[in-house]
Image: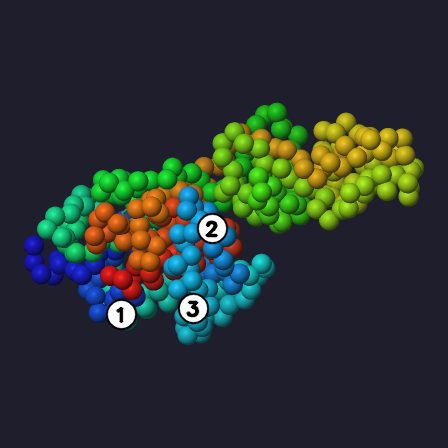
Amino acid sequence: MTSSDHYDAIVLGAGAAGLMCAAIAGQRGQRVLILDHGPNPGRKILISGGGRCNFTNIQCAPDRFISANPHFAKSALSRYSAQDFLDLVESYHIAWHEKTLGQLFCDESARQIVDMLLEECAKGAVEIECNVTLGDTTHSDGHYSCTLADRTVRAPTCVVATGGPSIPKIGGSTFAYELARKFGLKIVQPRPALVPLTLGADEALFRELSGVSADVVTISGKTRFREAALFTHRGLSGPAILQISSYWQNGENIAVNFLPDHPTGFLSDAKREKPQQSIGRVLSGELPDRLSTALLTKLGLDGEIGSLTDKRLNAAEERLKSWTFTPSGSEGFAKAEVTVGGVSTKELSSKTMEARSMPGLYVIGEAVDVTGWLGGYNFQWAWASAVAAGEAI
Ligand code: FDA
């Protein structure tokens, strides 16, 4: 091994967290090498936010993250805020806008965020190697050694920033979990999140609504999201469904409120106002036609609203406000934007992201059991956890 193969820190993964962490450490004078198996850095950033990268959320708060330990993310998130990342974006004159619910996007292209991070890495003289096949990673004499095809690289610090298994087609892998397990760290069972849910054959009527969307509230336990839901040929999607999918577990129900703005007694009031009006007409004034027809078919309701008893109308309203679906599954890691679960936060310092039992080993970004809501939260966690580690190494 030559001295050129010896670094202060090796960062595994040139994604959002890896690039940010390496840039911070490099600018602090560390000699940093990033290794990635993909053809180029920041591939998920490039496709994020429909190509415009929803790079943070100005309403970021710790209660918008899912983790076995809901307190873990607080420290890093408070020390590197959405405003901090926005300041960086603005220092590069990248034009941005708030789309909705605090979500900040580039006006032009996600490529600008990748270029900004690469420029930050260049300022810290960070070396980046892509198309690398990572062989064995070992630890001895206070150093981590990574075997590559043509050589072995070594450093006292190894940062695991290889994300989760979501979207393997663009580099997602379970590498972080395998490495963590090898070094004795526990993993919280990973599952796909921010993912479309599928409906079984018994829900064929809803699957026929493919393309119909409605403004709804989705509910799982005490968690609720008010956004659009979209019916697809496989089941349910759209932001309200993606959000609730992160809280959903196989076999559980989710509930959908199709009438979130309607006061209790809305249908019986409509009956008193215009008894001759058909129930179909009443509902299609509130929901897309095809959806209201499907819901009424399921409810077995038809004809003039005046011919229906208040009891039936109230029961129908109750179901419309809490329609239960039992998804048959989800579209899996192939379609999931992120992964819930990952390297257990019990194993890591919330201040530095260093493994408690393995000095010099850090885990950041999506690889950690911290998962944000849809809307820029996952990048904010990537930046914040990366800065926490980058300042510590
Ligand atoms: P990330 O996945 O970014 O990077 C991991 C890197 O490690 C990759 O470059 C990968 O190639 C590399 N790697 C993996 N395995 C390896 C191995 N075995 N050897 C070497 N390298 C390896 N979030 C958000 O806040 N706003 C948004 O707009 C979006 N939009 C969005 C769209 C889509 C389609 C997806 C799939 C995801 C999003 N996200 C998002 C989520 C966001 O992309 C995600 O949370 C972050 O990219 C996580 O950053 P990391 O750096 O942890 O992992």
Question: Which residue is labeled 2 in the image?
Answer: 65
Disc assigned to residue 268 = none
Dot placed on the residue nearer the N-terminal end, 3 or 1: 1
- At 50% from the left and 52% from the top, the residue drawn is 64
Label 3 secondary element: helix
Q: State the separation of the CA atoms marked 3 and 2.
A: 19 Å
Marks 3,1: beta carbons within 8 A: no
- At 82% from the left and 31% from the top, the residue drawn is 311
Local crowd size for mark 1, using a 10 Å CA cut-off: few (<14), some (14–19), many (≥20): many
Disc assigned to residue 84 = 3
Residue 354 in view (yes/no): yes
Local crowd size for mark 2, using a 10 Å CA cut-off: few (<14), some (14–19), many (≥20): many
Dot placed on the residue nearer the N-terminal end, 3 or 2: 2
70 or 150: nearer the viewer: 70
142 or 19: nearer the viewer: 142
Local crowd size for mark 3, using a 10 Å CA cut-off: few (<14), some (14–19), many (≥20): some
In the picture, residue 308 is in which quadrant? top right
Q: Amino acid at mark 3?
A: Asp
Q: How many marks?
A: 3
Label 2 secondary element: strand
Residue 266 image position (x, y, % from top left): 81, 43
- At 26% from the left and 50% from the top, the residue drawn is 355
In the picture, residue 188 is in which quadrant? top left
Dot placed on the residue nearer the N-terminal end, 2 or 1: 1
Could you tell whether 45 is left or right of 308 in the image? left
Mark 3 vs mark 1: give the one in front: 3
Marks 3,2: beta carbons within 8 A: no
Could you tell whether 324 is left or right of 261 in the image? left
Q: Amino acid at mark 2?
A: Phe
Q: Amino acid at mark 1?
A: Gln
Disc assigned to residue 27 = 1
| Mark 2 residue's CB less than 8 Å from ligand 1 | no
